[in-house]
Amino acid sequence: MSTLIVTVDGNVAEIVLSRPDALNAISTQLATELAAATDRLEADPAVRVVVLAGDGDRAFCVGADLKERNGMSDAEILAQRTTFRAAFGGVLGLPQPTIAAVHGFALGGGCELALSCDIVVADETATLGLPEVSIGLVPGGGGTQLALRRLGPGRAADVVLTGRRIAAEEAATLGLVDRLVPAGSARNAARELAKHIADNSPVATRAAKRALRNGWGLDYAAAMDVEDAAWRTAATSADRREGIAAFNEKRRPVWPGP
């Protein structure tokens, strides 16, 4: 892949958007490669956590490559849309827990890629935002819905309708960022967090993620049914048997996995 760097270290995979000269802007090629990478990682039972990061010193990702889009016809924009939806959907749909490591600019589609992850770790250099309305567009990588779920209707409207840039500290206060770390440490902090999660049962963490994602927006009774289904998956797994045996034998578990 020429626009991504994908590595696996133990049970943790890292996808690095690698167009640093373009501030990791999402081109058609990057979107195509990102969709393919997430497909491969989804199918890899050894991968328990995925970290998403950006190459270079200035940006996680500044969103869609507007230089590439300049002069595109409506038909070409709509054709590209299918590719972009596959890329964003690939990140959002990963069954493994996902962590965004954000530094510098995370704007437009870059912000949406971060919000597509389960946990956003950002350093003090981060600037997030959904500026699409300022160029005649609407966030299309899940931005309106992900912001709504994270921030609530009023704050989501503030972020989406103003299109303003939001510094790291305010982003953490709003809830766009989950962990704020010192400048230059986002990737290391995300990797350490990923290793911590990867130590847990992969069956249980995947099931817990499904409960967190699928229960959102449901009434309490329906959401509890979602949780019950996740619990039953874990409770009847070999991971549960190994976890309880390891606890009683005072040793680290060796997870059978999915």
Image (cartoon, rainbow, N blue to C red):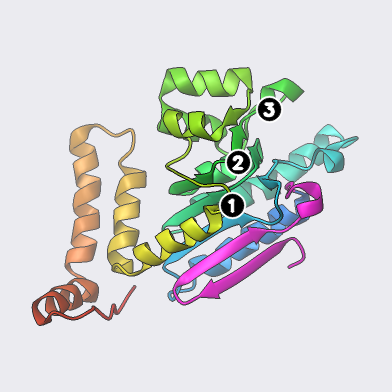
Q: Nearer the viewer, residue 51 or 32?
A: 51
| Residue 55 in the image: above or below residue 22 | below
Count all numbered tags in the image, as a single digit: 3
Q: How many angstroms separate mark 3 from mark 1 (CA)?
A: 27 Å
> Is residue 96 toward the left or the right of residue 79 in the image?
left
The answer to whether residue 58 is left or right of residue 170 is right
Circle 2 residue: 125
Q: Callout 3: 10 Å neighbours few (<14), some, many (20+)?
A: many
Tell me which residue sits at (50%, 32%) in the image: 169
What span is in magenta? 1-26
Of the residues tagged 3 and 1, which is closer to the observer?
1
Q: Residues within 10 Å of mark 1 (few under 14, many from 20)?
A: some
Residue at mark 2 to residue at mark 3: CA–CA distance: 22 Å
User: In what element is the residue under mark 3?
Assistant: helix
Image x and y of residue 83, in percent:
69, 50
SS at badge 1: loop
* Residue 23 point in image, percent of width and height: 75, 47
Check disc 3 and give the amino acid type.
Glu
Res. 96 in view: no
The quarter holding residue 165 reads top right
| Residue marked by disc 3 | 132
> Can residue 75 be seen by looking at this rendering?
yes
Residue 180 position within the rendered picture, expressed as x and y whole percent measured from the top left: 46, 43
